[in-house]
């Protein structure tokens, strides 16, 4: 929970902005259905959880607020009268800000619309991205270099001319990152929107659950569903074994997200809904035989693998292992994916190969590897850090951080609370990766990255990076007192000096993007090189043209597996 004491920062920050200048946007989530549809395959004599329930809590909850960005270099405005201005004035009065009209009139401030989405299963204290933009008739010209002051986020509705707020669900604040890939001269609108990476903090948890179908609601069935789920999924709380399902009423069973599926909520719910209720041993054997046959058919392989994953146990695992040697690549992949979530080592080589060679499978293969508690999976991910594909390299890095965040290779360094910084001692083409979603993070693939002289780069509105003769770079921060650092052409030294002089994550990203655009940075530079879902699988009887890019598939069969949250742009 966020301490109310932090609200006291507002008057001080606003006073500072009164005296001196401090100093691929679009939708931030891919549309998802709240209902994860299951293929209707026969289960002889068996009732599955999904036959009597439907899922609860898989939607994204939109939160909104009116906020204030400070620290602009004269690019803000005095907002015109509007419901948004009235809402901001009310908030400033509540916080006892002195001279609120004078604050809003400053060209170094801008009124913004703030938006964020609470993902399924998010817990109090978890972070998520925040999107900010100026109102449609705003005269603000740029949010670059700005800082969003602490903003209270709720579900909003406009009734008449007034904005009505729901319960407080999150708070947000932090430096605004304007899209580093945007050409702000050709599209000025991009300068008036941005993100605060991991700038939102949930103040309430969102429950997952199962709602019993109306005609089947009863205490008895609710208890049966809870028992069936707990026989398959449990975790340990202070050393005690505890199931993930809690029947609450005759119509609702609450679910705790199992740790293995923390980055793939959709798959967890699909597996839960494929769990059998009160299945006899004879029924189980008949169903295993049916699933074995269905698994070998590419049309039914995805659902069969999920249902075997839901069964778990030695017999189900044996069927999945046997399918790893099937002729069809879909059968092999879905079997390996299910085995990974069962933490079976035999899945690792096939998933690593899929991540390396098949773009349609890449996002799912990396997510599955990250869910394992297996040293072999970690080593395969480590090897993928050195391949040619940028999205495979960064995808493997993110998978490793999800799997083992404390490992020395990927742990990184906290740069004064502004972002995490990783210098990976790996071979392969030198590459620098930055994010515009999920978390503020800079990753250097390889330790030798240098800037070419001469150069003049901006790192935010107050820091100038100026290349000198003799292989030196002077970094200056301008203000009441000018501060300077002199470093070599090393990118690592330059980043550290910018941060030491007060530079934020957006400042460093701006500097690196300018360096790449001007030719001063020889290393490969990528922003959000994330593996993508929704690609189509190239079937063995199709042939990709020689000119097709290595990360793009051209063919005809959509991969039927839920997209994991680990690589989404909405985090």
Image (cartoon, helix red, strand yellow):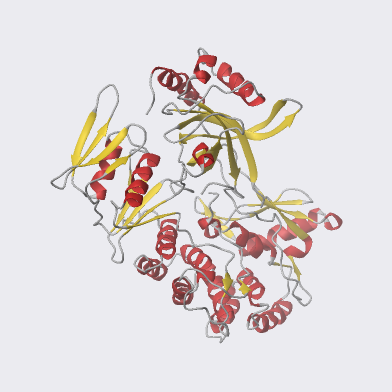
Which residue is at the front of the view, 65 or 290? 65
Residue 202 lies left or right of residue 228; in this view the side is left
**Residue drawn at the location 73% of the way across and 80% of the way down:** 282
Tell me if residue 266 can be seen.
yes
Residue 104, relative to residue 460: is it above or below?
Answer: above
**Residue drawn at the location 73% of the way across and 25% of the way down:** 161
Residue 432, relative to residue 290: is it above or below?
Answer: above
Number of numbered labels in the structure image = 0
Residue 362, relative to residue 468: is it above or below?
Answer: below
Which residue is at the front of the view, 209 or 126? 126
Residue 64 lies left or right of residue 102; in this view the side is right
Residue found at the far bottom of this picture: 327
Which residue is at the front of the view, 319 or 455? 455
Residue found at the far top of this picture: 99
Where is residue 458? Give x, y as percent. Answer: 33, 39
Residue found at the far right of this picture: 215
**Residue drawn at the location 46% of the way across and 37% of the way down:** 176
**Residue drawn at the location 75% of the way across and 57% of the way down:** 54
Which residue is at the front of the view, 225 or 177? 177
Residue 330, quarter of the rendered image: bottom right
Where is residue 132? Give x, y as percent. Answer: 54, 37
Residue 486 lies left or right of residue 441; in this view the side is left
Residue found at the far left of this picture: 470
Tell me if residue 202 can be seen.
no
Where is residue 293? Give x, y as percent. Answer: 67, 84
Where is residue 563? Give x, y as percent. Answer: 58, 61
């Amino acid at each position: 929970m966020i301490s109310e004491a932090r609200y006291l920062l507002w008057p001080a920050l606003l006073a500072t902005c009164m005296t001196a200048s401090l100093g691929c946007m679009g939708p931030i989530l891919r549309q998802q259905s709240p209902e994860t549809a299951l293929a209707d395959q026969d289960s002889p004599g068996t009732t599955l959880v999904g036959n009597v329930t439907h899922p609860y809590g898989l939607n994204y909850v939109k939160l909104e607020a009116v906020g204030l960005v400070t620290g602009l270099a004269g690019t803000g405005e005095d907002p015109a009268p509007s419901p948004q201005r009235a809402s901001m004035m009310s908030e400033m009065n509540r916080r006892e800000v002195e001279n609120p009209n004078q604050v809003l009139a400053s060209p170094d401030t801008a009124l913004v619309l703030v938006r964020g989405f609470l993902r399924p299963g998010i817990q109090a204290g978890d972070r998520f991205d925040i999107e900010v933009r100026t109102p449609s008739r705003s005269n603000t010209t740029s949010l670059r270099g700005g800082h969003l002051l602490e903003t209270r986020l709720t579900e909003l509705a406009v009734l008449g001319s007034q904005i009505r707020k729901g319960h407080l669900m999150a708070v947000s604040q932090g430096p605004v990152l304007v899209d580093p890939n945007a050409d702000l001269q050709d599209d000025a609108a991009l300068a008036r929107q941005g993100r605060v990476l991991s700038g939102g903090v949930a103040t309430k948890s969102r429950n997952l659950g199962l709602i019993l179908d109306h005609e089947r609601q009863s205490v008895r069935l609710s208890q049966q569903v809870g028992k069936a789920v707990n026989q398959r999924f449990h975790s340990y709380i202070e050393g005690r074994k505890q199931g993930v399902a809690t029947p609450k009423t005759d119509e609702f069973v609450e679910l705790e997200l199992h740790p293995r599926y923390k980055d793939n909520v959709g798959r967890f719910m699909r597996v839960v809904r494929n769990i059998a209720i009160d299945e006899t041993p004879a029924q189980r054997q008949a169903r295993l035989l049916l699933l074995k046959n269905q698994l070998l058919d590419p049309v039914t392989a995805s659902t069969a693998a999920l249902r075997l994953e839901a069964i778990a146990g030695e017999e189900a695992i044996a069927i999945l292992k046997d399918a790893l040697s099937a002729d069809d690549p879909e059968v092999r992949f879905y079997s390996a994916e299910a085995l990974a979530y069962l933490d079976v080592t035999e899945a690792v080589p096939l998933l690593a190969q899929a991540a390396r060679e098949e773009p349609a499978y890449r996002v799912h293969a990396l997510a599955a590897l990250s869910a394992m508690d297996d040293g072999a999976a970690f080593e395969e991910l480590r090897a993928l850090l050195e391949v040619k594909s940028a999205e495979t390299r960064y995808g493997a890095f993110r998978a490793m951080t999800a799997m083992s965040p404390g490992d020395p290779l990927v742990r990184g360094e906290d740069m004064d609370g502004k972002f995490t910084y990783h210098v990976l001692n790996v071979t392969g083409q030198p590459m620098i990766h930055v994010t515009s979603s999920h978390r503020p993070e800079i990753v250097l693939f390889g330790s030798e990255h240098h800037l070419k002289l001469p150069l003049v780069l901006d790192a935010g509105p107050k820091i100038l990076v100026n290349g000198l003769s003799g292989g030196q770079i002077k970094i200056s921060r301008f203000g009441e007192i000018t501060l300077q650092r002199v470093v070599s052409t090393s990118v690592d030294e330059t980043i550290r000096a910018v941060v030491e002089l007060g530079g934020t994550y957006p400042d460093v990203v701006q500097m690196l993007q300018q360096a790449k655009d001007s030719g001063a940075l020889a290393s490969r530079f990528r922003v959000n090189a994330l593996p993508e879902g929704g690609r189509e699988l190239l079937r063995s009887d199709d042939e990709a043209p020689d000119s097709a890019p290595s990360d793009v598939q051209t063919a005809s069969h959509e991969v039927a597996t839920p997209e994991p949250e680990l690589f989404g742009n909405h985090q």
